[in-house]
Image (cartoon, helix red, strand yellow):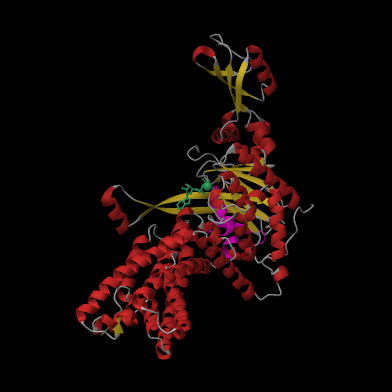
């Protein structure tokens, strides 16, 4: 049985509209006008028990709204949801025993107390035996490498340290499903990587299912096998991460610095030069891994002069989504049959709003 | 799959704790929340001490004002109270006010910063959670205020009233605390609808000060006003317990507690209803 089953989920918010100025305020008081926001617009997917599923999309795509509906703190406007056999908004407290939640940077640890106090409190709240709680804290302290942090007041922890404790706290009652809404927001690269490693480890060791949202494709790439991409409340991609990488994370951007100045009209075979900096030391270029392999580009760049520095960047999520829309459109003419097939498996690919004929 | 950690018994089904009744498990939950807040407040003894200092300042002003009043009246008793009794009354009333829980601020803050999502996603009652937090927070400050204010008045006006009445006062103060919690929680629940609740809380506290008899015991009020004020919940929050403290007797206690229980039932019922309406709105409209 699926851990999560979502069918044709919709959520419309009524946002109060207010004209500018005092007159606007008075008018809004007298007769509030509402704009409707279609935050979730027909989302459907299933998640297997123990799966590690990424849910990504730009800001405002509807990720948090979806997570809130899955945990039962928001009613949907329409659609069916089943989480571990519960209808979340009808059985919020029963469901709470079986799921763990982390909402971005919002704190659940008691700020002025050491994290271990919150852990012990959660033990009582989830009605666990004291001995079980002790052993569980012990195991989580190792898994998250937080043993040395547990006795420090939370306010003295760095954000990365705190987030490790936050995620650990949400796992205290050994939930079957962990819902993480942007757990890595605001973290530096190293802290992000540590959280990801631990989540992957716990997923493998305990079989806890993880649904994780992010607006950063990189988060998902190293963590999940499968990814759902949402945009404007709709699913635009639902397939393997490896497929996404192969098809839509192929355009790389490279920045290099040389020890010596490059001549005017400098080119590298198989790449497009975007910019040559003043003096010719810094060069920005782009290439597509389907046409030119990374190693070839690196070799050619190294052959051209003495490399001082080099960074390779993935396309932004917005660029990926644009690429997905382009391949999904039959007249786009990309002719990449494999890509359109992969997108079609999503079964919910929509045209970008406003792009419909 | 090899579990890396001991598997706890299926949560929510009681598991290893199944031998304990649901009520006992539930009580353990709220006791733990209370104790955690107690620890958090007590983690700042300097803060508690600084707050206790304000009761000393207030009482110092009161001592001078009321001394002058009694001297001007030229009598040892005014409105049936001696100067010492009036001052002990004021210590207790001030202690209640200065140790009041702050659920309105806590609830509004949780709505604003989004941590409400966590509070709705834990297997406990949202209102009882805030009740336990408030109780833990109040208790620490209550002890600090009572000790600091009491010491000053003892020094100036002599020993406190008959200790045999103290257990009765404790019961009355607990009920008073709960009524006030209900009122302020009601205001906090407005935070589900409007952004700002501080203004409402400000108005409530001013009404409480006036009709509860914080600055002047109700005994000094003109008759008509006094009759009205005595029946309002504010008197059951402040005047009742403070007045019982200075002249404890069983009849006064019985009368007070009956009124308190009635108000508590009303305010508690209203808060529960407001919560249900509020959470419905919140879960439909979003935070
Ligand atoms: N409580 C709310 N009232 C009105 N609009 C909301 C509310 N919550 C979210 N929205 C709107 O719904 C859309 C989706 O929001 P959200 O789910 O938070 O996106 P994401 O988490 O992907 O950034 C956004 O346009 C947002 O402004
Ligand atoms: Mg979000």
Closest to the observer, A59 or A191? A191
Residue B39 figure quarter: bottom right
- Outermost top residue: A263
Q: Is residue A341 above or below residue B109?
A: above
When asked about the image quadrant of residue B49, the answer is bottom left
Q: Quadrant of the N terminus of chain A?
A: bottom right
Q: Is residue B107 visible?
A: no
Q: Say whether residue B276 is left or right of residue A86.
A: left
Question: In front here: B192 or B94?
Answer: B94
Q: Residue B143 location, x and y as percent? A: 46, 70
Observer-nearest residue: A79 or B279?
A: B279
Q: Is A24 on the left or on the right of A95, as rendered?
A: left
Give the percent coordinates (x, y) of residue B234: 36, 76
Q: Give coordinates of residue A210: x percent, y percent.
A: 66, 50
Q: Quadrant of residue A82?
A: bottom right
Which residue is painted at 33% across and 70% down in the image? B59
For the point 54% across and 42% down, the residue is: A186
Question: Is B201 in the magenta?
Answer: no
Give the residue furthest to the right: B2
x%, y% of residue A73? 54, 59
Q: Is A69 located above or below residue B124 in the figure?
A: above
Query: What stretch of residues is rendered in magenta?
Result: A63-90
Which residue is located at x 44 percent, y 85 percent? B165
**Considering only vertical position in the picture, is A134 above or below A41?**
below
């Amino acid at each position: 049985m699926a851990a999560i089953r979502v069918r044709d989920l919709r959520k419309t918010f009524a946002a109060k509209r207010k004209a500018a100025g005092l007159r606007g305020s008075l008018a809004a008081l007298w007769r509030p006008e509402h704009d409707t926001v279609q935050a979730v617009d027909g989302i459907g997917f299933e998640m297997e028990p123990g799966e590690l599923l990424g849910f990504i999309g730009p800001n405002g795509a509807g990720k948090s709204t979806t997570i809130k509906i899955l945990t039962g703190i928001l009613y949907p406007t329409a659609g069916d949801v089943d989480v571990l056999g519960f209808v979340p908004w009808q059985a919020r407290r029963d469901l709470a025993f079986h799921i763990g939640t982390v909402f971005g940077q919002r704190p659940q640890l008691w700020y002025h107390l050491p994290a271990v106090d919150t852990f012990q409190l959660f033990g009582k709240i989830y009605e666990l035996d004291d001995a079980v709680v002790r052993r569980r804290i012990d195991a989580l302290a190792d898994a998250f490498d937080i043993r040395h942090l547990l006795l420090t007041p939370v306010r003295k922890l760095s954000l990365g340290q705190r987030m490790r404790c936050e995620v650990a706290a949400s796992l205290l009652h050994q939930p079957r499903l962990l819902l993480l809404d942007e757990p890595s927001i605001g973290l530096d690269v190293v802290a992000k990587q540590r959280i990801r490693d631990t989540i992957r480890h716990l997923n493998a060791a305990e079989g806890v299912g993880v649904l994780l949202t992010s607006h950063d494709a990189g988060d998902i790439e190293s963590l999940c096998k499968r990814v759902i991409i949402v945009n404007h409340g709709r699913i635009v991609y639902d397939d393997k991460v490896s497929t996404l990488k192969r098809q839509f994370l192929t355009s790389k951007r490279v920045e290099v610095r040389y020890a010596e100045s490059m001549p005017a009209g400098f080119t590298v075979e198989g790449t497009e030069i975007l910019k040559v900096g003043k003096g010719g030391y810094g060069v920005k270029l782009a290439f597509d891994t389907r046409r030119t392999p990374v190693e070839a580009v690196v070799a050619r760049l190294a052959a051209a002069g003495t490399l001082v520095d080099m960074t390779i960047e993935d396309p932004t999520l917005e660029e990926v989504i644009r690429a997905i829309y382009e391949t999904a459109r039959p007249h786009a003419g990309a002719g990449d049959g494999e890509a359109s097939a992969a997108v079609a498996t999503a079964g919910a690919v929509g045209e970008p709003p406003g792009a419909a004929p | 799959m090899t579990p890396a950690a001991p598997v706890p018994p299926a949560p929510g089904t009681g598991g290893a704790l199944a031998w304990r009744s649901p009520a006992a498990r539930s009580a353990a939950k709220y006791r733990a929340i209370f104790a955690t807040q107690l620890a958090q407040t007590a983690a700042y003894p300097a803060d508690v001490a600084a707050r206790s200092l304000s009761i000393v300042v207030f009482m110092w002003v009161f001592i001078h004002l009321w001394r002058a009043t009694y001297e001007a009246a030229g009598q040892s008793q005014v409105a049936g109270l001696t100067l010492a009794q009036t001052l002990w009354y004021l210590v207790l009333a001030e202690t209640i006010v200065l140790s009041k829980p702050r659920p309105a601020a806590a609830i509004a803050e949780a709505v604003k910063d989004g941590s409400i999502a966590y509070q709705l996603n834990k297997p406990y009652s949202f209102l009882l959670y805030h009740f336990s937090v408030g109780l833990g927070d109040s208790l620490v400050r209550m002890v600090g205020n009572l000790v600091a204010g009491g010491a000053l008045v003892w020094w100036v006006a002599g020993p406190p009233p008959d200790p045999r009445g103290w257990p009765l006062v404790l019961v009355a103060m607990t009920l008073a605390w709960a009524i006030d919690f209900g009122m302020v929680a009601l205001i906090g629940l407005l935070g589900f609808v409007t952004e700002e609740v501080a203004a409402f809380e400000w108005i409530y506290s001013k009404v409480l000060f006036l009709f509860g008899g914080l600055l002047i015991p109700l005994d000094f009020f003109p008759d008509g006003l006094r009759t009205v004020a005595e029946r309002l919940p504010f008197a059951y929050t402040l005047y009742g317990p403070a007045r019982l403290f200075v002249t404890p007797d069983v009849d006064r206690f019985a009368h007070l507690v009956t009124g308190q229980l009635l108000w508590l039932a009303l305010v508690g019922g209203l808060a529960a209803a407001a919560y249900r309406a509020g959470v419905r709105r919140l879960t439909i409209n979003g935070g």
